[in-house]
Amino acid sequence: VLLNINNHRKETIMLKVIEHHSASAGNTFIDCPQMWIIDKLYGFETEENARMKMGHTAEYTAYDALTNQITDEETITESAKHQYVMKHHGNEADDECGWSAEIAKTFVKELKQYGEIISYQKEWKDNYPGLEIPIIAKLDFEFKDYIVDTKATAKVWRYAPTAADRKAGRRGKINHNYHPKPDHLRQQFLYRELFKKDALLLYASAWDTHTADLGDHVGHLDTIIQAFKTIEHILTIAKTKEDVVRMYPLTFDNWRWRYSPGAESFARNIWNKAWK
C-alpha cells in the first residue's frame, strides 16, 4: 500500500522546467513539439533573423513616432534604419532594413485611428483557472477600446484582382488562409481573455496592409489552453527531460527549422543522447 501511495505521489509532481506558459510557447508546442523541447527544456536560443529584426524595428519605430508626434516620413525612415542596424545589429544592405521603415510608416498611419496609446509592451502574469503554471503575456499596443498586435511581414497575401477590382483601382481580396493565421488567432483570443479588450491583428508589408478582427472564429482560446494543459500533463508523467524527448520522433518538416540556424544539429544531439 505504501508503495502505491509513493508512486501516486511521484506521478503528481511536475518536472520543474518551465516557469510560465506563453502564447508563443503554446503555439510552438502545437506546431512543432520538438522545437518547443529544445527551446524550453534545453535552452536553445534562436538567433534573431532578418525578419525578426524587421518586426521589432518597425514596431518600436512606430511606437516612438506615435508617442513623440513624429509625422515626417524621412525622420521615421532614418529612425527605422538606425534601429535595424544599431540596436538589432542588422545589415543596412538587407531588404528587411528598407522594408522595416516602410512598415513602420504604415503602422503609424493605421494605429493613429485608435487614439492615444495607453500602454506599450504591457505585461500580464498570473494564474489561470485549470492550470498549475502561470501565464505570461506581453501586449504590443493598448488603446482605450482595443489591443493591437502588429505583424510585420514580407507579403500581405491576396488573391489576384478581378476585372472589377482592376477597374475600380482595388487590390485583390485578402487570402484568409494567411490572414489571420491560426497561431495569431490563438494568441489574440488569449490576450482578449486576459486583458478584457477587443483584439485586432495589424498585418503590414512594405507595400500593403490588412487589419483583422477576431470575427466569428471559434475554438482558438480552447486550443491554446488545451496546449498548456497538455504541456503540464507531459511534465507530470515525465520523470526527466529525456522522457519528454522520447515521446516525440525527431522530424524537421515544420517551417520553424528553416528560420532557426543551428537548431537542427542541436536537436539531433539531444535526441541521440536521449536514446543511447
Image: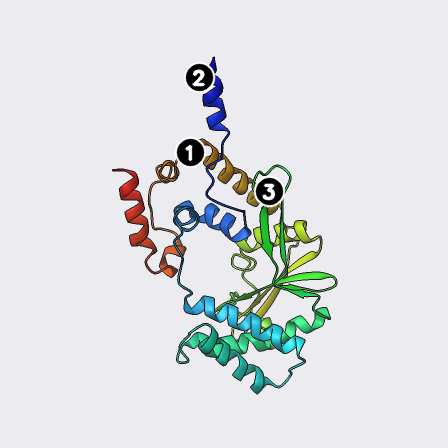
Can you say whether 241 is above or below 264 in the image? above
Instruction: Give the x, y percent position of residue 71.
Output: 64, 83
Q: CA distance from mark 3 to mark 2?
A: 37 Å
Q: Nearer the viewer, mark 3 or mark 1?
A: 1
* Between discs 3 and 1, the one toward the N terminus: 3
Q: Could you tell me the amino acid type at mark 1?
A: Ala
Which numbered tag is attached to residue 238? 1
Q: Residue at x 67, y 65 (%)?
A: 119
- Residue 130, by quadrant, is top right
Q: CA distance from mark 2 to mark 1?
A: 19 Å
Q: Nearer the viewer, mark 3 or mark 2?
A: 2
Q: Residue at x 30, y 43 (%)?
A: 271
The quarter in which the C terminus is drawn is top left
Q: Tell me the element at label 1.
A: loop
Can you say whether 78 is above or below 28 in the image? below
Q: Could you tell me the amino acid type at mark 2?
A: Leu
From the viewer's side, name the closer residue of 151 and 213.
Answer: 151
Q: Is any part of residue 10 visible from this angle? A: yes
Pointer 2 residue = 3
Can you say whether 148 is above or below 85 in the image? above
Instruction: Give the x, y percent position of residue 131.
Output: 59, 39
Q: Residue at x 56, y 64 (%)?
A: 174
- Residue 121, by quadrant, is bottom right
Pointer 3 residue = 222
Q: Is residue 129 left or right of residue 232?
A: right
Q: Could you tell me the amino acid type at mark 3?
A: Asp
Q: Residue at x 47, y 21 (%)?
A: 6
Which numbered tag is attached to residue 49? none
Q: Tell me the element at label 3.
A: helix
